[in-house]
């Protein structure tokens, strides 16, 4: 089985690669095909087509994407919609042309409307207005779902999509401006603890609630969905709605999350909240009942995952973290 993991150096892609490597070490006959962004630009249609023609993988896992938090999405909306649209279109179409029958695409919970009923079920897609702060990224991810659906309908492919909640873990982006909320908090509270600061200010009111899934759980869920017999997958997904949510089914307020991170990093000062900064969607909780019926549930508790992530953060070179 020749499997191409696109985006293997990212947080999710590297976790999937670790999980596949573990299978190979356990005796599975797997050949892993990877390319760095320097070796293969996924926004270059010709390069992606030539790569697929040459390598002819049996399966493709599309974990590559341009990602970032609220600040990055607000600052670079053109790049977020352009790059992610091009990556999805190029990889999915080139895989089809190369005869790849099975593909798994990773999306995001931001595909759902800002005011979707909580928890958000798969059939909430395209039923309302998106959250403005990350609308360009969300539209690109919705297009990826529809690409998979369309190739399945027209060509009989088995292209599947999984929609994760907020992910975190080893390999995350801890950049002070372009990271997601949890790694941003880890870095901020760590630096404050090291400096002996008396206060840390967190963006927003602290009232929004978010769900967090450890990246190793995401990798396990991705391979679980990829491995499902088609009849089982089809039984849980309408042919016109071929995606499955992945999450924990529980959420936490940003204020409580900040306190957990503060405790984990040893910060003992005051936590304040800047309500002049945007909160984004007030709640984003995934309905994971479809995946649960198929037999998969998350296993890594948030406290355990935070400790694991913080230890990984501490083990990194300071210069490398500044560049992430």
Image (tube, rainbow, N blue to C red):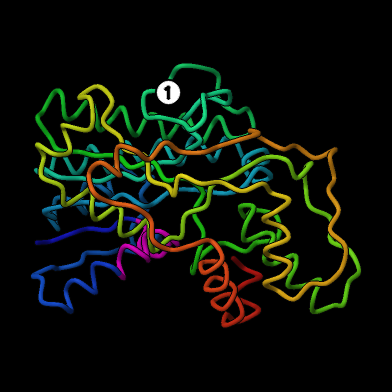
Q: What stretch of residues is rendered in magenta?
A: 7-18
Q: Is 238 placed left or right of 254 in the picture?
A: left
Q: Is 205 placed left or right of 136 in the picture?
A: right
- Extreme residue toward the top, this view: 127
Q: In the rendered view, would you say 87 is above or below 176?
A: above
Q: Is 108 placed left or right of 181 in the picture?
A: left
Q: In the rendered view, would you say 52 is above or below 10?
A: above
Badge 1 crowding class, 10 Å Cα cut-off, few under 14, some 14 to 19, many 20 or more, is some
Q: Residue at x 22, y 58 (%)?
A: 4
290 or 88: nearer the viewer: 290
Q: Residue 152 in the image: state x and y as whole percent.
A: 16, 29
Q: In the rendered view, would you say 229 is above or below 303?
A: above
Q: Is 159 placed left or right of 195 in the picture?
A: left
Overall secondary structure of the magenta stretch?
Answer: helix
Q: Which residue lies under the disc numbered 1?
A: 124
137 or 161: nearer the viewer: 161
């Amino acid at each position: 089985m020749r499997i191409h993991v696109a985006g293997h150096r990212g947080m999710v892609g590297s976790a999937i690669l670790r999980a596949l490597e573990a299978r190979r070490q356990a005796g599975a006959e797997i050949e892993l095909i990877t390319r760095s962004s320097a070796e293969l630009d996924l926004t270059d249609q010709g390069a992606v087509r030539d790569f697929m023609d040459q390598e002819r993988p049996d399966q493709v896992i599309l974990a590559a994407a341009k990602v970032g938090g609220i600040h990055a999405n607000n600052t670079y909306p053109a790049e977020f919609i352009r790059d992610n649209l091009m990556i999805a279109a190029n990889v999915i179409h080139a895989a089809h042309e190369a005869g790849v029958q099975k593909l798994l695409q990773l999306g995001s919970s931001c595909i759902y409307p800002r005011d979707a009923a909580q928890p958000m079920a798969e059939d909430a897609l395209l039923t309302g207005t998106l959250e403005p702060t990350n609308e360009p990224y969300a539209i690109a991810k919705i297009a990826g779902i529809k690409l998979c659906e369309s190739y399945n309908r027209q060509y009989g492919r088995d292209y599947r999509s999984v929609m994760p909640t907020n992910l975190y873990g080893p390999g995350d982006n801890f950049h002070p401006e372009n990271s997601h909320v949890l790694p941003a908090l880890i870095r901020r509270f760590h630096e404050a603890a090291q400096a002996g600061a008396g206060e840390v200010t967190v963006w927003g009111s602290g009232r929004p609630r978010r769900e967090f899934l450890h990246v190793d759980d995401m990798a396990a869920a991705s391979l679980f969905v990829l491995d499902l017999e088609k009849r089982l997958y089809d039984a849980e997904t309408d042919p016109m709605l071929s995606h499955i949510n992945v999450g924990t089914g529980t959420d936490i307020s940003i204020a409580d999350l900040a306190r957990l991170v503060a405790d984990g990093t040893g910060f003992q000062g005051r936590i304040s909240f800047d309500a002049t900064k945007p909160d984004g969607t007030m709640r984003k909780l995934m309905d994971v009942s479809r995946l649960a019926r198929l037999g998969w549930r998350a296993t890594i508790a948030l406290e355990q995952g935070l400790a694991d992530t913080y230890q990984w953060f501490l083990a990194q070179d300071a210069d490398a973290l500044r560049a992430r």
